Amino acid sequence: MDVVRSIMGIAAVVLVLGGSTAGCGQERTVRTSLVTVSSRPAVTAHDTTTTAPARRTMPSVSSLPPTTAPSHSTADWGPPSPEVARAFSQLDDRLAGVRLYAPGELPADTSIAATWWPISSGKSPALWADHPAPNPRVIGRGADAEVRVALRVGRGDSWVEILERVKGDLGDLTGEPIGRVAGHEATAYRFMGGDLIQWSDGGAWFAVYGRNLKSGAARRIALAMKPTGP
C-alpha cells in the first residue's frame, strides 16, 4: 500500500470510510485515506507550509508486531485534565470557525506530551528527540489546517494521538464499525501495532490512535470525542 512520509519521518494516518454498510461488530473492507506530510523538521513554530512528500511502501498491517503490554492503568477515567482541556481550547481559538473535536473523557493520568511526534508511526519517540515539534501541531491555515495532538498516558510508553481534518491517499484496509462519534459512524482498525478509530464530519476526517493502551481504551476515547466550533 502506497503512503506518503510523515512530518518527522513516517506517516500519521487517518482512514477514510467507504464501501458497503455493515452492522456494528462486523468486519468489512473499506477504502481508506492515508494521511501524509513532509519528512523534514518544521521550519517555523507554526508549521504553516509543507513540501510535497515522496511516496514509499509501508509494511502490511498483518506483518506488524503486536502492541506491547501497557504500562498504565485505565481503571480511573474522567474529563480531560485542565492542561489537556486548555490545549484543545487554544486550538479552538486559533482555528475559530473550523470544526474540531476535543476529548470528552480520558484515563485520569493523561497529559499533553512535551513535544509532538508521530505516535501512529509505530516508532520510538527517541527517534525525534533531535527535532522537537510544537504540540499540538498545526499544519496550514483555516479550514485547510490539519491538526495533530500527542497525549501521554501515565509515565511509561502509552500514548494517544488525536488527528483532525486530515487528508491523503487511498488504499484498502479491513475495519470494524464500533458505533458513532457525535452521530458520525466510527470504524476501528489495527494499524502499526496500535488501534486507530476514524470518522468523518462535514467532509473532514478525524481519528484517535492509541498505542500501548489497554484493550478498548482507544475506542472509548474516540467514542467520547466531542465536536467544537461551528
Image (spheres, rainbow, N blue to C red):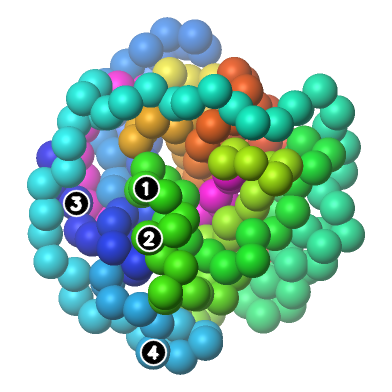
Image spot of residue 105 (x, y percent)? 79, 39
| Image position of 14 with respect to 145: above or below | above
Determine the CA span between mark 1 and mark 3: 16 Å
Left or right of residue 54: residue 72:
right
**From which residue to which does the magenta span run?**
159-175
Residue found 88% across the figure and 59% down from its top: 82
Residue found 64% across the figure and 60% down from its top: 113
Image spot of residue 128 (x, y percent)? 41, 65
Q: Which mark is residue 123?
A: 1
Q: Is residue 163 magenta?
A: yes
Three-letter residue code for mark 3: Val
Q: Is residue 187 magenta?
A: no
Q: Taken as a whole, is the magenta stretch helix, strand or loop? A: strand
Determine the CA span between mark 3 and mark 2: 20 Å
Q: Earlier in the sequence, mark 3 or mark 2?
A: 3
The residue under label 3 is 3
Task: Give the position of the N terminus as an image quadrant.
Answer: top left
- Mark 3 vs mark 2, foreground winner is 2
Three-letter residue code for mark 1: Lys
Mark 1 element type: loop
